Every structure is written in C-alpha cells, then in structure tokens.
C-alpha cells in the first residue's frame, strides 16, 4: 500500500499539477476571449447579410457576402462628416486632458503646498460622479455661457470629465520617477517647467498612452452628451450616424452592423499601435526596487 501512495514532493507529481493548473487557466482565458470576440464577429458577419437573412441565416461565415453594405452605410449616413467630427473631438479632448492633467499631476507630485492632499482627494473624488449625473447643471451652465450647440460646448465637458483619471494615473507615475534626474537638470539651469516638459513628460509616455486610450474610447463612443448639447447635424459625432439606420418601425440591421464595424476599426487600430506602451503603463510601478 505504501508504494501506491503519491508522494507530493515527487517531480512528476509537481509537473502534472503545474500542467493541470496551466491547462485550466488557458481554458478559462480562451473561453473569456471567445465570449468577448463573438459579439464583434457576429456584428461583422451580420453586416455582410441582407435585411431578410440577418436573423434567418445564423451562419457566422456568410456565403454570399454583401460588401456593398459598407459603401451604402458610409454614404447614406454621411459617415464622412461624422467621422471627421469624431476625429476632431477625439484629438482635441485627448490633447486637452493630457496637457492639463500632466501639469496638475506633476504639481501634486513635486510641489509642496498647504492643502495639497485634500485638493488631490477632491479632484479624484469627482470620478464617482458620471457626466450624465450632472446633465441638468451642465446644460444650465453651458446655456448661460452660450455654448449650447457649439463644438466648444461639447469638448470642454469631456476634457473636464477626463481630468480626474488623468491626474490620478500620472501623479502615481510621477511619484515613482527618480528625483535625481530632475535635480541634475535643475543644476544645469532648467526651470520647473522645462524639467516638466523635457524630463518628466517624456518619461511618462507609457502612462500617457494608457490615459490616451481610455480617453479615446470614452470620446469616440460618446453619445448622450452629444444629444444634450448638439442639435446641428453638422456638429454631431460618429455615434449619431448610427441612428440613421434605426427608425421607429424598422431597423436596417446589416447597415447598422456595418456602421458599428466602421466605428470599431479606428479604435482597434489605435489600440494595436499603442499596445506596447499600454502594457508598460499598466505594469509601471508594479515592481519596486
């Protein structure tokens, strides 16, 4: 009987245990990945079908692919105008959030003044208040400033909404930067702003990439604020174009899915381009020493 018992310290037993854990871990990750990718692939497959077959033909690989749906979706919804609007809003908001949040985060990290910690907590506590929760006060404020139905009235609230997360991420990153680099630059005659611009900001590129992708996703997918602030179709973002295919009595699902794929592709491309910096930014500060 003693020879049949498995010794927990046996090398083969440890290898088998490790392989079993690895197998179930990979199985779980594959399952989660398939669950995340399936809706996107279903939207892509549905965009290649006709209105009559989108729910009858449940195939994920349509035989007769109707690529003309993308051309019709682009032209009928006037996606070129909405696309340029969303591109302008996204670039402007990202630049505004990164510039203002980086300066504020650097000040919170390096400057010492009375009430610094309290002010920082007040800033990041606003992350608990979503933009839709302040729509009434926001509309009244923008109306008094005559910013309703203007690009500036749509951009400023989104910059303000992205600042708390940006300040939190960048301050944490600046806190981990070695101060010896800044001291050396200051000895060479660099002022506070030049140290921030030439030393701290370039070193914070991984954290800035993480912040940029979060802001890009938020601005690119924004819809509710546009419906509140904007009424001129020439100023509407890309998400507004998707509503062209959804009517009161019928929804043109193939064209709607084609429009969704069009809106997803730019964000996917940006994520692939910034992937290396995003991973660095997420893991930055995880290892001390």
Image (cartoon, helix red, strand yellow):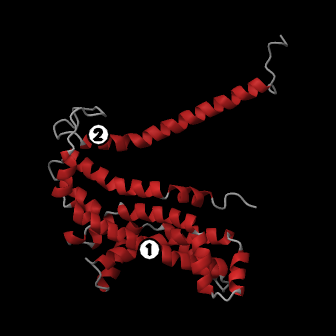
Residue 180 rendering spot, x and y as whole percentages:
73, 76
Does residue 191 lie above or below 233 as drawn? Answer: below
Does residue 271 lie above or below 68 as drawn? Answer: below
**Disc nearer the start of the sequence (2/1):** 2
The label number, if any, that marks residue 189 in the structure image: none
SS at badge 1? helix
The answer to which image quadrant residue 186 occupies is bottom right
Residue 112 rendering spot, x and y as whole percentages:
68, 84
Residue sitting at x 22%, y 57% = 243
> Which residue in the structure is indicated by mark 2?
45
Judged left or right of residue 6, residue 128 is left
The answer to which image quadrant residue 155 occupies is bottom left
Residue sitting at x 83%, y 12% = 3
- Label 1 neighbour load within 10 Å: few <14, some 14-19, many 20+: some
Residue sitting at x 75%, y 24% = 12
Q: How many marks?
A: 2
> Which residue in the structure is indicated by mark 1?
95
Residue sitting at x 31%, y 66% = 86
Does residue 42 lie above or below 184 as drawn? Answer: above
SS at badge 2? helix
- Label 2 neighbour load within 10 Å: few <14, some 14-19, many 20+: many
Question: Contact, CB < 8 Å: mark 2 with mark 1?
Answer: no
Judged left or right of residue 66, residue 112 is right
Q: Is residue 158 visible?
A: no
Residue 212 rendering spot, x and y as whole percentages:
47, 65
Report the Cα–Cα distance between label 2 and label 1: 35 Å
């Amino acid at each position: 009987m003693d020879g049949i018992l498995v010794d927990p310290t046996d090398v083969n037993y440890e290898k088998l245990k490790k392989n079993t854990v690895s197998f179930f871990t990979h199985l779980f990750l594959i399952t989660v990945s398939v669950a995340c990718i399936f809706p996107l692939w279903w939207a892509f497959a549905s965009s290649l079908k006709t209105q009559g077959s989108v729910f009858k033909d449940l195939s994920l690989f349509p035989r007769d692919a109707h690529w003309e749906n993308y051309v019709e979706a682009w032209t009928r919804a006037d996606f070129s105008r909405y696309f340029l609007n969303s591109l302008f809003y996204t670039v402007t908001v990202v630049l505004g959030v990164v510039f203002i949040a980086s300066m504020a985060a650097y000040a919170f990290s390096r400057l010492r003044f009375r009430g610094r910690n309290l002010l920082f907590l007040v800033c990041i506590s606003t992350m608990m208040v979503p933009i839709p929760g302040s729509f009434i006060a926001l509309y009244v404020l923008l109306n008094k400033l005559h910013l309703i139905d203007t690009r500036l009235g749509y951009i400023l609230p989104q910059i303000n909404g992205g600042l708390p997360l940006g300040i939190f991420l960048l301050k944490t990153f600046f806190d981990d930067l070695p101060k010896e680099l800044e001291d050396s630059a200051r000895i060479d005659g660099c002022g506070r702003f030049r140290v921030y611009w030439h030393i701290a900001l370039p070193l914070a590129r991984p954290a800035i990439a993480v912040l940029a992708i979060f802001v890009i996703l938020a601005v690119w997918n924004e819809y509710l604020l546009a419906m509140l602030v904007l009424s001129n179709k020439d100023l509407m973002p890309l998400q507004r174009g998707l509503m062209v295919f959804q009517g009161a009595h019928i929804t043109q699902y193939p064209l709607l899915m084609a429009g969704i794929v069009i809106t997803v592709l730019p964000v996917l491309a940006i994520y692939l381009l910034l992937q290396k910096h995003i991973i660095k930014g997420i893991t930055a500060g995880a290892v001390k020493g």
